[in-house]
Amino acid sequence: MVISVIKEEKQYRRLFLAGIINGIGDRFSSVAMLAMLLHLTGSGMAVGVTLAIRLIPFLFFGPLGGWLADRFSRKAILISMDLIRIVFALSFLLVDSKEDLWIVYVSSFVLAAGEAIYAPARKSSIPRLVKKDHLVKVNSLEQVMVGIVLIGGAFSGGIVSTIFGANVTFWINAVSFLGAAAIIATIVFPDKVETKKTDKEKKGNPLSTFKKVVLMSAPIQLLLFCEIVIASMNGIDNVLISVYAVKEYQLGDVGVGLFYGALGIGLMLSFLVANRLRNYFLLTGLICLMLEGTFLMLLSRTHLVIFAFLMFCGAAFMSGIGNACFDTILMKEIPEEHQGTMFGLLATIGNTLLGISMFLSGSALQFVDPRSLGLIGGMAFTTVAIFLMAVMSTKAYRRKGTI
């Protein structure tokens, strides 16, 4: 089934391959870079600062990336961002001591800024490269891509860095950007769509466009609320993966890789269900959100490693199906000429809230034990899903139209 979709959508196949290549390269580099920081400083402070720096650019460059995607060639944006990031990916090779930490901070900021511009251009390219009736299949393949990157990057990156050294991973990252740019250069974007977008471009800043699009669609309003809640709660999961592995199960770095691998497996398996969906995307997505919360609650209660691994797989499986459903709705509901702007602003909101959530979650662990915090996060997902399904059942919502 995966192969048939990839074969039929030739242009997306190249975008998919480019995403895997630069995604794995970036994960390799991130693992090695964070390990290098711990080695040089002996403290988690530098790691925390670097992680914060990687999120800040989305606040400023996310809207810019969306604005650019709606006004200029998305192909040119994708290639340019990959090529520019090569130099900064290699700059980590120059770091030898604490005095060189500024290189890590500056390069991390630029790399994240490049991703903030790259992401909305890539995502808004998908509806233009694939058939409309293949959108849900392709969006489910996007979850497969994330799974492959998690397994091939986060899990394998630490092994490669340990065996061959951090410098090798930095070179791999640079080469991956070059390879991705070369692949994207072969993608043929529909000229007619690009011309139509340029000719009909409307004036107005990104925020006014965002407000107008949100107000015109009830499903988008529901999804915006859902995205805000998910981003606000996902910080708990991001923090707890390492805490569960190291402190709760005493597995060390191997456990971190094991649990990230479980997430990757769950996301890849989600394709088996998501690509078969034909309608009721919003309801299906909310049911998956509720079940994801259920898995997270069960995870917070178990003391068996194998069961924890399965709960991570289950949560990611539901998350992958839900994400495919939500992305498909957005691509169908948002007018084509505004998709870049909308995806850029949604990424900005999501990453900003994720950063705040991670900070608050880390702080909360000083007062709340990890399992209680995990239970709270799972309950929040489930409660919000049930609430939104109740909203969908109201007459006022049905009058506006549903998906």
Image (tube, grey):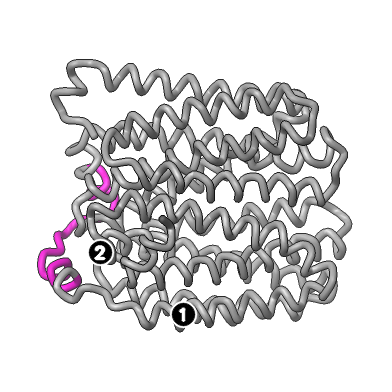
The answer to if 319 sits in the magenta stretch is no
Camera-side residue: 361 or 75? 75
Q: Residue at x 86, y 65 (%)?
A: 40
Looking at the rendering, the stretch of residues picked out in magenta corresponds to 194-211
Q: Name the residue under label 2.
A: 128
Give the alpha-carbon distance from disc 2 to disc 1, as whole Å: 19 Å
**SS class, disc 1:** helix
**Image quarter of residue 155:** bottom right
Q: 35 above or below 398? A: below
Q: Name the residue under label 1.
A: 181
Question: What type is the residue that disc 2 sits on?
Answer: Arg
Q: Which residue is drawn at 63% across and 74% down?
A: 173
Q: Which residue is drawn at 44% across and 36% down?
A: 228
Q: Where is residue 69 in the image (x, y as percent from the top left)?
A: 31, 66
Camera-side residue: 134 or 182? 134
Q: Residue at x 12, y 68 (%)?
A: 196
